[in-house]
Amino acid sequence: MSEHPTDPEIIERLEAGLLRMPKLRREIFLAIRLDGLSYAEIAERTGLSVEQVERHFAQSMLALRDALDRGRPIPCWKRILRRIAERWQR
């Protein structure tokens, strides 16, 4: 794909990113972005804490950013920071 993707390419990448997410994370993302629910409302409905909902939403945003970046070379420093973040989350 080109350096500047077209709108259909962007939509395709975002859809693929959404489909790769775990179901709960995808549902939290869609509840916030499409339904306009608050973190507290989602926490109450799912039985998660507000902090867990925030974490899922943040991870969904990172996953979508990564989906948009697919095909572009990732700078070395970003790969290193990603590995550090992955180890920190364990």
Image (cartoon, helix red, strand yellow):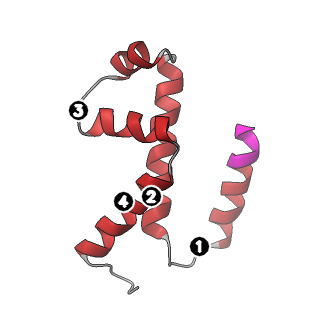
Is disc 1 placed on a helix, strand or loop? Answer: loop
Q: Is residue 27 above or below residue 78?
A: above
Mark drawn on residue 35: 3
Residue, disc 4: 15
Is disc 2 placed on a helix, strand or loop? Answer: helix
Question: How crowded is the residue under tag 1: few (<14 C-alpha within 10 Å), some, or many (20+)?
Answer: few
Query: Residue 6 lies in magenta, yes or no?
Result: no
Write the start and end of the magenta stretch as one range. 85-90
Mark drawn on residue 65: none
Residue drawn at x 67%, y 56% is: 81
Residue drawn at x 42%, y 42% is: 26
> For this rendering, which residue is in front, 20 or 59?
20
Quadrant housing the N terminus = bottom left
Residue, disc 1: 74
**Mark 3 and mark 2: Cα distance apart in space:** 19 Å
Nearer mark to the viewer, of 1 and 2: 2
